[in-house]
Image (cartoon, rainbow, N blue to C red):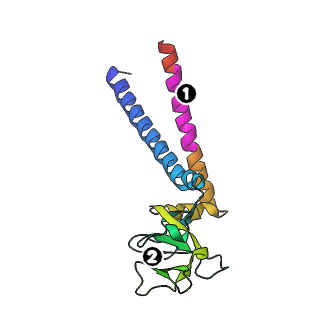
Amino acid sequence: MTAREDDGRSLLRTLLNTVLWSVLVVFLAVVAAAVLVPRLLGGTALTVLSGSMEPTYSPGDMIVVVPAGAEEIQLGDVISFHPYPDDPALVTHRVIAVQTDGTGELSLVTQGDANSSADEPIRGEQIAGKVLYDLPALGFLAEAMRGDSARTLAIWAGGALLILGLTGTALRWLRRAKAGT
């Protein structure tokens, strides 16, 4: 093998390692944003299912919702709430009005950004939380991983192969560094 061929392989190997490490860093950042941060803040990650909040959030986006009481919610905030008391379903819409009824109890009026009319007012006990941030299209991946399917297996297998490959690369780097000293 000539020195030129060896240099070409070395460059290709370095490029491949850089790409693999970059993918791993992005993967870990996404996992942290979708799993770790919501847990640390007592929140949850939800998948947007409808287009009622477009263009802000589209179907398939993941939103991270953290607990918030009615007194913490401000005009313009996007919140997730139970549209009917004692109903586990959640809706995520923007607060367009904050009202107080005759007894002094606070209620919020919400509306989807893509909707032409407001929702019925909700009370504080219906609020699940406030949207902290979103991860575009990540909800599709989360939904795919929830099922017991071949797609889920392929995703986990791909992630495992990526981690194994990067571990092998790191071990080779360590051996070379040790041999060089």
x, y percent for residue 175: 53, 20
| Secondary structure at numbered mark 2 | strand
Residue 48 visible in the displayed image: no
Q: Magenta segment: does it hold 163?
A: yes
Give the camera-side residue of 73 and 133.
Answer: 73
Which residue has dot 2 on it? 95
The residue lying at 46 percent from left, 39 percent from top is 21
Q: Contact (CB < 8 A) between labels 2 and 1?
A: no
Residue that lies at the very extreme toward the left in this rendered image: 4
What secondary structure is the stretch in magenta mostly built from? Answer: helix
The type of residue carrying mark 2 is Val
Find the distance from the CA under tag 2 to the CA under tag 1.
Answer: 52 Å
Residue that lies at the very extreme toward the top in this rendered image: 181
Q: In this picture, is 85 found above or below 18?
A: below
Which image quarter: residue 97? bottom left
The residue lying at 65 percent from left, 79 percent from top is 87
The type of residue carrying mark 1 is Leu
Which image quarter: residue 85? bottom right
x, y percent for residue 155: 57, 54
x, y percent for residue 11: 36, 31
| Secondary structure at numbered mark 1 | helix
Numbered badge on residue 148: none
Q: In this picture, is 113 found above or below 136?
A: below
Crowdedness of circle 1 by 10 Å Cα count: few (<14), some, many (20+)?
few
Which residue has dot 1 on it? 171
Q: Quadrant of the N terminus?
A: top left
- Which span of residues is magenta-colored? 161-175
Give the camera-side residue of 71 and 114.
Answer: 71
**Pair 2/1: label in front:** 2
